Image (tube, rainbow, N blue to C red):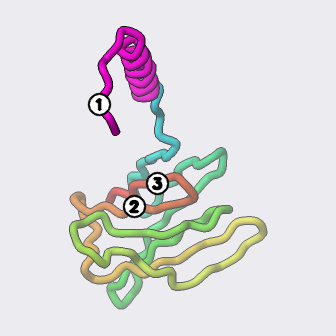
């Protein structure tokens, strides 16, 4: 490309385009809102519930006789996945079974022994585009 002399018209064109781009970036930054919702569910007395898109999600913690713990999630919408909020790479928990009752379904997850239900432990449940932080 041959070097051209910077004319007044070319300079005005560059400044107008730059001002339009800067205005668009500032407007988009100021009006940004995340579509993802993070809800907090504090388990007390073994259960808690939150409202996701006008639907109630019930979460219950069960302790089995052999020492294992299960998390039962009752919802109309199937959870995408449940993961442990930690630095470990493989921290997604697998669904054990499903129990259907009318329009609601209970999804049961077995918590491994590495998951301690203490005050510093948190699980993240993903339902559709929403996140539920489950605190113990």
Q: CA distance from mark 2 to mark 1?
A: 57 Å
Q: From what the image shows, is residue 124 above or below residue 50?
A: below
Give x and y (percent) for residue 9.
42, 11
Name the outermost residue toward the right. Answer: 102
Residue 73 shown left or right of residue 104 in the figure: left
Q: Residues within 10 Å of mark 1 (few under 14, many from 20)?
A: few
- Name the residue carrying label 2: 124
- Give residue 29's quadrant in the image: top left
Q: CA distance from mark 3 to mark 2?
A: 7 Å
Name the outermost residue toward the bottom. Answer: 66
Give x and y (percent) for residue 34.
47, 40
The answer to whether residue 24 is magenta is yes
Mark 3 vs 2, N-terminal side: 2
For image coordinates 73% across by 72% down, the residue present is: 101
- Give residue 57's quadrant in the image: bottom right
State the extent of the magenta-drawn residues as a range.
Answer: 1-29
- Name the residue carrying label 3: 131
Name the outermost residue toward the top. Answer: 8
Q: From what the image shows, is residue 19 above or below residue 29?
A: above
Mark 2 vs 1, N-terminal side: 1
């Amino acid at each position: 490309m041959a070097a051209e002399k910077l004319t007044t018209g070319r300079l005005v064109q560059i400044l107008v385009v730059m001002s339009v781009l800067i205005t668009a970036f500032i407007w988009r930054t100021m009006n940004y809102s995340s579509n993802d919702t993070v809800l907090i569910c504090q388990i007390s007395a073994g259960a808690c519930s939150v409202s996701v898109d006008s639907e109630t999600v019930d979460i219950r913690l069960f302790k089995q006789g052999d020492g294992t713990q299960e998390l039962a999630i009752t919802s109309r919408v199937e959870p995408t996945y449940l993961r442990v909020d930690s630095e470990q790479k493989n921290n997604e928990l697998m669904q054990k079974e499903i129990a259907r009752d009318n329009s609601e379904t209970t999804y049961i997850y077995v918590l491994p022994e590495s998951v301690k239900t203490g005050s510093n432990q948190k699980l993240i449940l993903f339902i559709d585009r929403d996140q539920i932080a489950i605190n113990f």
